């Protein structure tokens, strides 16, 4: 039994090494068509291998669609783009049943036509421009990995990953996602403007007559296997407690560990799902960097995309120009990096496997 466990662990370590190599090759392939945006690309891949979904916030023209299409092509995954509009209906996303004639029997019967949600990577463009009823159809598919039409369940083919975009500028005529639905997204990724040199390279490349060919890095079966391996990566107790402490410090009036600036600027803090996502994202980041262990540095690196849409600020924060990112930055500075000694009484931290470990 022990030999099997050791053998499985060695195989997982080898697979994590392959994932680290694949991450380097994927960045190399993406650089053929995308200039910059390395951080956003890494965060998208972290969420993908942690089986999460992303909300991407950025002004138009920052290569968000191109980035997702490039990832899909490099990983041999099917890609679908849905442009959300005020008149979009749930059936336009999930699919619908139509009456057709059976050529064998001549009888009429219902036949299901698959919607664009039936793809491995789904880009939900400007999700806040469609009414809540249609938003709910997408979010249900994200949560359940299936759609129900006419009482029949239609499972979505894994791997399944949704990346929704929002325009931070235009808010007129939009339907903002409520906090309960925002909480279903693992990451809130902010895509920023390119630097001067990056923009020069973008203009130079996109105005030339050249279409680079992307090589395949992984296939869908390898992606699924690596998703399972990410869950099996061991994590020390003190790292889990570090993630929990960071989340609990965002809750004003609920825990003694909340700092004064949280009491002053925060209306609602992050829930337990944030702790789960911090740990899963930490595991995925460690795997992408070829490591079979998670450190508090991994937790800090994923803290902003995990927490920024879960920390709700108040009017005092707005008056003092303090946003969620600034609060998270202060929390990371407040929380000691050697939290393991204070949390575990100086003892060596125990290492445990996730509940999904094989």
Image (spheres, helix red, strand yellow):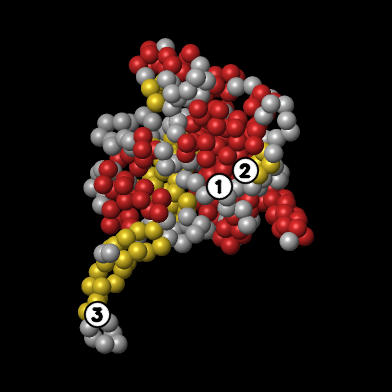
Residue 78: mark in rendering: none
Estimate the spatial distance between the alpha carbons at disc 1 and disc 3, rounded to whole Å. 43 Å
- Quadrant for residue 319, please give it: top left
Residue that lies at the very extreme toward the bottom in this rendered image:
105
Q: Nearer the viewer, mark 1 or mark 3?
A: 1
Residue found 23% across the figure and 73% down from its top: 99
Q: Nearer the viewer, mark 3 or mark 2?
A: 2
Label located before the other in sequence (3 or 2) = 3
Q: Position of residue 297 (x, y in %)?
A: 65, 31
Residue found 55% across the figure and 47% down from its top: 50
Closer to us: 176 or 168: 176
- Label 3 sits on a secondary structure element that is strand
Residue 50: mark in rendering: 1
Residue found 28% across the figure and 36% down from its top: 174
Q: Give the class, few, some or many, for how many residues have Cα within 10 Å of label 3's Cα (few <14, many ≥20).
A: few
Is the Cβ of the residue at disc 1 closer than 8 Å to that at disc 3?
A: no
Estimate the spatial distance between the alpha carbons at disc 3 and disc 2, rounded to whole Å. 51 Å
Closer to us: 140 or 172: 140
Closer to us: 267 or 71: 267
Residue beneath label 2, please?
283
Q: Position of residue 83 (x, y in %)?
A: 35, 48
Residue beneath label 3, please?
101
* Quadrant location of the C terminus in the rendered image: bottom right
């Amino acid at each position: 039994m022990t030999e099997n466990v050791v053998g499985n662990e060695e195989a997982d370590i080898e697979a994590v090494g392959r994932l680290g190599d694949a991450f380097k090759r994927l960045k190399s392939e993406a650089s053929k068509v995308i200039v910059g945006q390395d951080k956003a690309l890494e965060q998208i891949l972290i969420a993908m291998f942690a089986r999460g979904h992303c909300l991407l916030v950025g002004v138009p023209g920052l290569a968000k669609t191109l980035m997702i299409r490039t990832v899909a092509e490099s990983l041999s995954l099917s890609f679908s783009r849905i442009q959300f509009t005020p008149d979009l209906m749930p059936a336009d996303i999930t699919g619908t049943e139509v009456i057709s004639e059976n050529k064998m029997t001549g009888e009429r019967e219902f036949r299901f036509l698959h919607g664009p949600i039936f793809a491995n990577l789904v880009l939900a463009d400007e999700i806040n421009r469609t009414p809540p009823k249609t938003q709910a159809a997408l979010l249900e598919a994200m949560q359940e990995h299936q759609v129900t039409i006419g009482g029949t369940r239609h499972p979505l083919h894994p791997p399944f990953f949704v990346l929704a975009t929002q325009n931070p500028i235009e808010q007129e005529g939009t339907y903002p996602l409520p906090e309960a639905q925002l909480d279903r997204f693992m990451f809130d990724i902010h895509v920023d403007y390119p630097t001067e040199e990056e923009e020069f390279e973008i203009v130079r490349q996109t105005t030339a007559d050249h279409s680079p060919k992307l090589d395949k890095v992984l296939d869908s079966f390898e992606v699924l296997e690596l998703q399972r391996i990410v869950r099996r990566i061991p994590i020390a107790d003190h790292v889990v407690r570090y993630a929990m402490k960071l989340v609990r410090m965002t809750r004003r009036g609920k825990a003694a560990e909340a700092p004064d600036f949280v009491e002053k600027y925060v209306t609602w803090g992050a829930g337990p799902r944030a702790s789960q996502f911090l740990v899963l994202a930490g595991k995925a980041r460690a795997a992408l960097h070829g490591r079979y262990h998670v450190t508090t540095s991994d937790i800090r690196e994923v803290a902003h995309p995990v927490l920024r849409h879960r920390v709700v600020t108040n009017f005092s924060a707005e008056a003092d120009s303090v946003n969620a990112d600034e609060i998270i930055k202060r929390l990371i500075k407040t929380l000691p990096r050697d939290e393991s000694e204070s949390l575990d009484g100086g003892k060596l931290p125990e290492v445990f496997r996730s509940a999904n470990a094989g």
